[in-house]
Image (cartoon, rainbow, N blue to C red):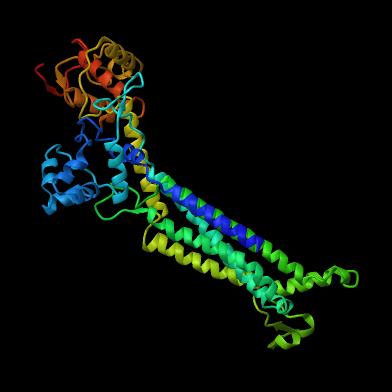
Amino acid sequence: MKTLKINLLLAVVLGLFQNNLWALDGAGLFKSRCNTCHMVDKNSTGPKLQGVKQKWTDANEGELLYKWVQNSTELIGSGKSTLAKEISTFSPTAMPAQALSNEEIDAVFSYIDSYVAPTEDGAVVKDSSAVIEPIKATDYKGNLSIFNWLMVLTVILIIAIIVMAGTLMTLMKSDYFKNKLKEISKNTNSLILIITTGSLLMSNNAHALNYIGPGEGEKDGPWLLVNTTDLLALLVIDIILLVVVLYLRHLFGQMISMVRPKAEKIEEVPALVSLKKVNQVLTDAVPIEEEHKILMEHEYDGIQELDNNLPPWWVWGFYATIVFSFIYLINYHILGVSDLQIKAYDKEIKVAEKEVQAYLNKMAMNVDETSATLLTDASDLSAGAGIFAANCVACHKTKGEGEIGPNLTDNTWIYGYDIKDVFKTVKNGTANGMPEHSSKFNPVQIQQVASYVLSLPAVKGLAPQGSIVEK
């Protein structure tokens, strides 16, 4: 009875924790979903949001506001909302679909309507144009990865529970426990309560995950939006399952102790006999004295085979691998929830390319043959001269008059005179012997040396090659 009360108290505490876990955070939702394009009290990429909910309510389109946030393109196409059509002219960029529930949208607008912007001295004013400091959006891809690992842990714990429960059932059906089932059933009540509590938590928390419907999510985005609270809930479930596993282990130990002889008989019976009995229950092997009952008919050179049953723990483990194989097949090959190695590699390459491009943009190195411009600052030309002296004089001489390579100072050009053409030539090289330099220099350095080449004064040197450019 004491154990039952403790477990009931645990269930109540977990229930209260669950309710607090899913409290909606309007400020967090706004900063992660809306703050990129919208400000609360000032127009930005999108219009200001203060008073928007009341405006839709006054137009008798309060319910359509949810549809607008969840999928603005679909609402505009349906023609059901006049306000949606008006707002769509604010910006040429369509508002992206947001996978938010009605309750989450209410929380966001509750935060917006109650928002007041603080000034630098800490005072609060209602009509402030202060920019809200953007907060990094939720990393749904990272959360989904953690979620998948937690789900793997959940499956492992469930398999462990199945295997241990199967072993316990085999042990309970043995002759040693037929007279003790009533005593064991008292302890199993708490086990049933724990498993029931875990299943209730799983069923109640399933609604927190946001599945992405067609046209709602971003391109190459995750198929499931997993918030931090979802991860916490799954972690709680895994802890409960771990408690169940430990409880089964404890229960198994208690049942094994029942198999062993009582204290007063230990002196009379060797410990080896007790271990043999335990081994017999776990392996479901027939005692040696009864092996003649399971002898198979065939015989080879005097050797006969016993028809023993497979060990119960092995059988349940085998069943667990079958269950896992179905889960693996459905996950990877049918639903495609998780990526196979090639697809995962391709995704990682795309992510790496985006990171490289972001780095180039950040370092102002997003220059290529389509966007290169002629640099005229002394610092850029000086840097280009240094690169030219270290890498180009062997073929073009110190003044660009040419030797192995053509004269770079006359008015004839083989591959083009424009800065974009010269940039491309230096970057990619040519089939006539000019090596590529993209592996040596970053885009800014290539632009500097190309600009320096175009700034060289005319010098008599190698005979003209290419077409004459009147510049």
Image spot of residue 192 (x, y percent): 57, 66
Q: Residue furthest left?
A: 470
Left or right of 228, for residue 53: left
Dividing the picture into quadrants, the one containing residue 326 is bottom left
Left or right of 130, for residue 156: right
Q: Residue at x 67, y 65 (%)?
A: 251
Q: Residue at x 36, y 21 (%)?
A: 122
Is residue 100 or residue 125 the one in the foreground? 125
Image spot of residue 335 (x, y percent): 36, 61
Left or right of 366, for residue 54: left
Image spot of residue 377 (x, y percent): 24, 12
Residue 469 appears in the rendering: yes
Q: Quadrant of the C terminus?
A: top left
Image spot of residue 113 (x, y percent): 27, 37
Is residue 336 or residue 218 the one in the foreground? 218
Q: Residue furthest bottom?
A: 297
* 192 shown above or below 463: below
* 433 shown above or below 4: above
Residue 436 appears in the rendering: no
Q: Residue at x 46, y 59 (%)?
A: 202
Q: Quadrant of the N terminus?
A: bottom right
Is residue 296 or residue 144 the one in the foreground? 144
Number of marks present in the image shown:
0
